[in-house]
Amino acid sequence: MGSQRLLRNYVKANLGLYSVGVAFIILSNVVQSFFPRVLGEFTDDLQLKVATSHTVAGYSLQLLGIGVAYGVLFGIGQYTNARLGRRFEYATRQKLFRHFSTLSEHYFSRHGVGKLLSYVMNDVTAVRESISNGVNQTTNAIFFILSAFVMMSFSSIPFGLIALSLAPMALIPFIVVFLGPRIRSRSLEVQESLATMTESAEEQFGGIRVTKTFAAEEIAYERFGRNVDDIREKQLRLVRMSSLFQSLLPLMGSFSMIIAILAGGYMTLHGQITLGSFVSLTFYLRMMMTPLQQIGNVINMMQRSRASLERLNHLLAVKPDIREEAKAAHLENGAGELEIRGLSFCYPGSDRRALEAIDLKVEPGRTLGIIGRTGSGKTTLVKLLLRIYDPPAGTIYIGGHDIRRVTLESLRSQIAYVPQDGFLFSTTIRDNIAFSRRDAADDEMQQAAREAQIYSSITELPRGFETKLGERGITLSGGQRQRASLARGFMKRAPILILDDSVSAVDAVTETNIVRQIRAAHRDKTTLIIAHRISAVKHADEIIVLDEGRIVQRGTHKELLALPGLYASLYQIQEEGTRHA
Ligand SMILES: Nc1ncnc2c1ncn2[C@@H]1O[C@H](COP(=O)(O)OP(=O)(O)OP(=O)(O)O)[C@@H](O)[C@H]1O
């Protein structure tokens, strides 16, 4: 029952409109069920030779009236339900997107983006189809069959003949109960494989440049091909089962028709029923064939959508790993004082400490340099500061507040973080830089670009700041991308600025200029500079050296150089590298 929650809530919220849609469809079916009856009466009048040209015109008008009324009523009902289906699709995608954005990085590192995209696209569409087409066709089919049955019962057709003719259709519920769950489980398999294929496609396209430079297209093709083969197999299994199901229902309808023709024909021959009743009966049965086919379609569709609905509900029930306390305080815009006390941290599922016994304090407006070998825990420290992963309570304080006790939004608004990979959105350079402050004045945005040493590169482009970037900013070089992302960080003007290896892709002269700008324009900001190159941190008020998650050295550039240790040896290696370059 829980699997239906999403749909149930939606239907509940839109019950009024749904009732209108369903009422129109029911009404259209009641109207339509008069058609065979009028036709039967017309046949009898013709056979008894009581029909005049006046009655012929009268019957034709009645039949036309029934046809038009059916069309209009059904059209309105169908439109109403289809609209509700589209609204469900729109609202559910919004809901999923909003929900995804509350989930932690840890969740996304376990679930491929392609798979999540597939849920948002394929599963939502499957449910929407069942809401609009499903509701329309089910209502239409059930109510047409019911109205036809009632009309037949109140006609001159003997009840025994009706019951005999409809007997094969009584088998339909058994067929549904037997085949329905089988279709659903096969459908679930197909949807899962579709999600895996989307994930694989996303990865292959994302890595297309690597594939091409390694001339490994065949390997990529083969990997993707394996997913496609898998889907084909599962689709075929599903198609076999649903085709069997869909053909069984009209087959039952055909048996009914044959019985009606045999028994009804016999009774007409022997004068037990009129020709008009025979025509009505066969026409009713003929008209039931389409709804029967529809029921087949709908049940197939419903089974597929139930599988999707289960998954969507499951996704929406995932609780974010990083949660705010019930009484989380709002972290006021402070001066940016930062303190870490005895911080140790293991990633979820790992028993290795990525950070161990970290203690440090950065006064407002001071700069801390963080240096260390790859994998030493530098980025982990930043992820904990931003609560991308939760640090243990009582270990990190900003402005004297334990960051575990404040709202995520107010915490993150205090920090401008510039990551190494400098992801840019497929929009204009302006929108990328002014990402956190869309309404900022142009000169403020241009100033941030100047500080990040990217201003002249942008103004040289034909459309300047209005240049649209391709997916992931493909039209910019790696260094330009990094600087654009740096400008975005500067633009936030938050009390704490964190640069995570954010100048690694720029040349030494540009790096020096950027560092100079940070020292001049961001003098009042608490700044953390993570770097591999000593040149990026040597001006910091304090530098810490991380090794295997521990602070192994701390001091100013001068102090650290004077001591034997990792810092001095790194400096030596880097200096030699520069001299030999
Ligand atoms: N999501 C994760 N799950 C488990 N372990 C992780 C995760 N991210 C990083 N680690 C591990 O934590 C350790 C520290 O990684 P971190 O990214 O902080 O290093 P770093 O100093 O920033 O390295 P680099 O200079 O290469 O960016 C590494 O051993 C890494 O393998």
Image (spheres, helix red, strand yellow):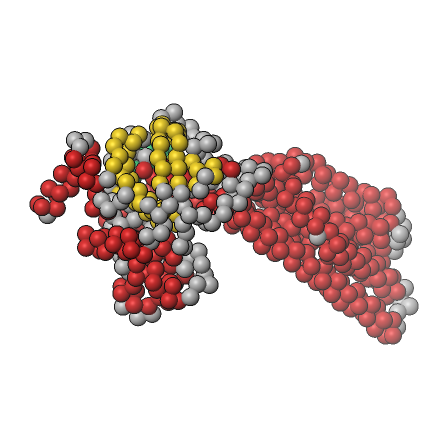
- Report the residue that reaches farthest toward the bottom: 53
Question: Looking at the picture, does residue 568 appear above or below residue 501?
Answer: above
Left or right side of 17 for 229: left
Q: Is residue 397 visible?
A: yes
Q: How many marks?
A: 0
What residue appears at the point 68 percent right and 56 percent down from the top-left corner? 81
Residue 156 image position (x, y, % from top left)? 89, 53
Q: Most extreme residue toward the top, as rendered? A: 351
Instruction: Tell me if 8 is positioned left or right of 350 in this view.
Output: right
Quarter of the image with the N terminus is: top right
Q: Nearer the viewer, residue 304 or 469?
A: 469
Q: Position of residue 438 (x, y in %)?
A: 45, 61
Q: Quadrant of ligand 1?
A: top left
Q: Position of residue 415 (x, y in %)?
A: 41, 47
Of residue 526 and residue 224, the one placed in the foreground of this image is 526
Identity of the residue drawn at 36% across and 55% down: 490
Would residue 467 be seen by someone viewing this image from the given angle?
no
Q: Residue at x 84, y 62 (%)?
A: 38
Find residue 86 and report its image quarter: bottom right
The residue nearer to you, when weighing 323 against 164, is: 323
Direction from residue 568 to residue 125 in the image, left or right: right
Quarter residue 580 falls in: top left
| Whole-percent x, y for residue 371 in the image | 26, 39
